[in-house]
Amino acid sequence: MLRAIVSRKVFWAVVAMLLAGFAVSVQAEPILLSIDVSKPSAVTITATGAHSLVDDSSANVQLGVVLLSFFNKAQEYAWANCTGDLTPPSSSSQGYNWWGPDTVDTAGLNLYAFTGGVYPAPEHAVQNFSTTASAFTGTCTVDLSSYAASLPLAGESGDIWAGSSGLGSHAVLGQWVAVPEPSTMCLLTILFGSIVAWMWRRRG
């Protein structure tokens, strides 16, 4: 009888801890960009549709955003095209068409736009991130085969800065995450099932 009471207490204590962990995950920074790193020559960055953590209009599309600590070590400055329609909110609807390591967070990935047009060009439009609207739309593909050894592992994540290269507010808009990543609910289900199975075996 005593063993049964203790087992029930342990069971509900573990359930309480799992629910507490889930509550923390729900309150965490929003995931704005999901990044498939399974193919380095075609890394795909996809908007999740989540809203920005803060309101921010401190940087134009040419400055873009920085995915902080995206690479596992500092990189030399470079730039290259990216393809697709990953777009921040702005009056020009100009999407990001270039990328490169940031000059401040040299392990960060800067996504930005440049068309080469004279002022005012589409990339000069201000990015208007809002807590009531999607931070990004669309997707883009980047060839990072030269950086394959420095790419994040699936499940790793980091903050997204507004602006780049020391310009803009550097406000944290939300997070990026490398996929595939097991969802919190999936993990909770597996853990809960394991506990139930363990309790059943003890009773048997």
Image (cartoon, grey):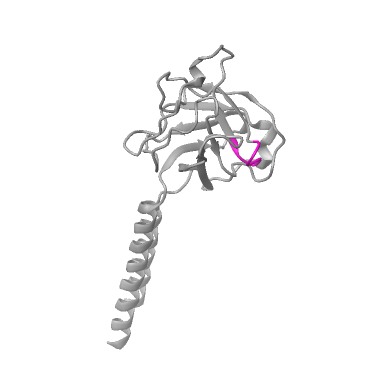
- Measuring 33% from the left and 79% from the top, which residue is drawn there? 7
Q: Position of residue 16 (x, y in %)?
A: 32, 68
Q: Quadrant of the C terminus?
A: bottom left
- Measuring 69% from the left and 42% from the top, which residue is drawn there? 74
Q: Position of residue 55 (x, y in %)?
A: 39, 38
Res 179 seen here: no
Residue at the far top: name it.
118
Residue 197 lies, with reference to residue 59, above or below; the image says: below
Q: Position of residue 79 (x, y in %)?
A: 66, 26
Q: Quadrant of the N terminus?
A: bottom left
Residue 40, picture quadrant: top right
Give the camera-side residue of 56 and 38: 56
The number of numbered discs placed on residues in the rendered structure image is: 0
- Tell me where the magenta segment starts and ends, as one range: 103-109
- Measuring 54% from the left and 14% from the top, which residue is drawn there? 119
| Magenta span includes 9 | no
